[in-house]
Amino acid sequence: MKITLSNITAYKKWLNKENKPLSLAAKDLAAHAAEINKDVRSFIAIDPDVITNRALSLEKQTKRGSLWGVPVALKDNICIKGGLTTCGSRILEGFRPPYNATVATKLQAAGALLMGRANMDEFAFGSSCETSCYGPTRNPRDLSRIPGGSSGGSCAAVAAAQVVAALGSDTGGSVRQPASLCGVVGLKPTYGRVSRFGLVAFASSLDQIGPVTTNVEDCARMLEVISGHDAKDSTSVDINVPEYTASLERDIKDVTIGIPKEYFTCGISKDVSRRVQEAIKALKGLGAKIVDVSLPHTKYAVSCYYIIAPAEASSNLARYEGVHYGRRSAHAEDLIEMYIASRNEGFGAEAKRRILLGTYALSSGYYDAYYLKAQKVRTKIADDFRAVFTACDCILTPTSPTTAFKIGERIDDPLKMYLSDIFTIPANLAGLPAISVPCGEDKSGLPVGLQFMAGPFKEEMLIRVAHAYERSR
Ligand code: GLN
């Protein structure tokens, strides 16, 4: 039996044609996803009974939402009430949250069929999906390569057609970079656009949940469902959520696209550069005006991020001490020993590195030199964007300097790994929305991604430009 999971519209047609109850279709979907998972390992686990039960409760929904029956994967750091949520970490072994993340509630209300937990780098620290305690996810386009990270499971699951769409989280590029490396669409919303309630915190001033889909239209549909103010997240913003799908069909003749010269120098591969130059030509052909712009503080973004993000992470991760959540060490004589042993056994090497880096940056005597300085640089980076958006509507860059690398290639070289996010981190530091769309392949047939960034709450602009570009290909 052939299941069509290429996009929401095609899937719904398939489901209609099948003409059987969703709970029966769900059995097929679970079996199909499990089969692919043997190779790709994008899901931590697929439980057919849980999926069937969810489908049964969707069958009872009288009002069918825009995502009714659509199979969706959630990254393992988005809480589902009663479902395992472990952030790819041993320290959260067996943790079942007592509540839903707001995005999970919204997806369920829209009728989405939640298929299970997508693998991720431990606590979303990483760019390769190799630091999960469950082992690496593989890139469906070449199983010897990484899918990108940290939302590698979400992106691989969409690219391998195990699901139609997924949610990831993006703190420094974790939706866009793996989307780019897997050849799918990934969007990081403006900070405050989507509720973070029930997203396990990594760096609270940077984290946003974003959709992963095969095309821009589905991305707009997903964003419509998950966006909006939430009283449970004090940083979510109370402004109207536009109908994103309505901006899909508009042309881009009135749009000015800025090309920042700082994004075309550092370590970018020839093939990536070539594909992006072709994209610029294509956008010109669609009537967009292309202008050169400058974001002079870009060169500090990675250093700035690797102070601020670990600082916030070290503070957020202090809550895992073997008492409140997940795993407790059995090898301790007293309370302090139990804290230490639980953390030592529960966290992997990269998580420990981040906690050390962050604690150091926040420690007395170093706070001013590192953390405070990084905050000032962050303001400069945001100011660069504000200035540039007076001259253009959106900015175009590559999403990642290279295509997918081999499993194991960068795992022992943190600096090399951190540089994978050189083009995605600035949008997080400035709180801006950004999207990655496929823009062809390199010589080995690996996907290249194109990134558009826009001003705060200008997701409509991103969707319009990305959709026009996608259609032109
Ligand atoms: N790769 C970056 C990091 O390791 C970004 C991660 C993310 O966005 N969650 O911090």
Image (cartoon, rainbow, N blue to C red):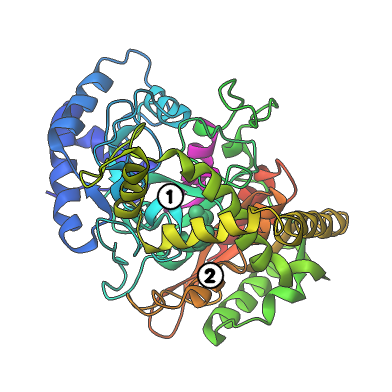
For residue 42, what is the image quadrant? Answer: bottom left
Q: Amino acid at mark 1?
A: Thr
Q: Is mark 1 within 8 Å of ligand 1?
A: no
- Identify which residue is drawn at 64% across, 54% down: 363
**Label 2 beta carbon less than 8 Å to ligand 1:** yes
Give the magenta range.
Answer: 208-225
Q: Residue at x 29, y 73 (%)?
A: 142
Instruction: Give the label on residue 166, or none.
Output: none
For marks 2 and 1, the one nearer the N-term is 1
Q: CA distance from mark 2 to mark 1?
A: 25 Å
Q: Residue under circle 2?
A: 418
Helix, strand or loop at label 2? It is: helix
Mark 1 secondary-structure assignment: strand
How far from the left and from the top, in percent, is residue 173?
54, 58
Mark 1 packing: few (<14 Cα in 10 Å), some, or many (20+)? many
Q: Is residue 172 visible?
A: no
Mark 2: few, some, or many residues within 10 Å (few <14, many ≥20)?
Answer: some
Q: Residue furthest top?
A: 62
Instruction: Check disc 2 and give the amino acid type.
Output: Tyr
Q: Is residue 248 left or right of residue 338?
A: right
In terms of image quadrants, where is residue 109? top left
List x then y, in percent, for residue 444. 38, 83
Q: Nearer the viewer, mark 2 or mark 1?
A: 2
Q: Which of the labelled discs sits on residue 213, or is there none?
A: 1
Q: Residue 214's spot in the image, x, y percent?
A: 42, 53
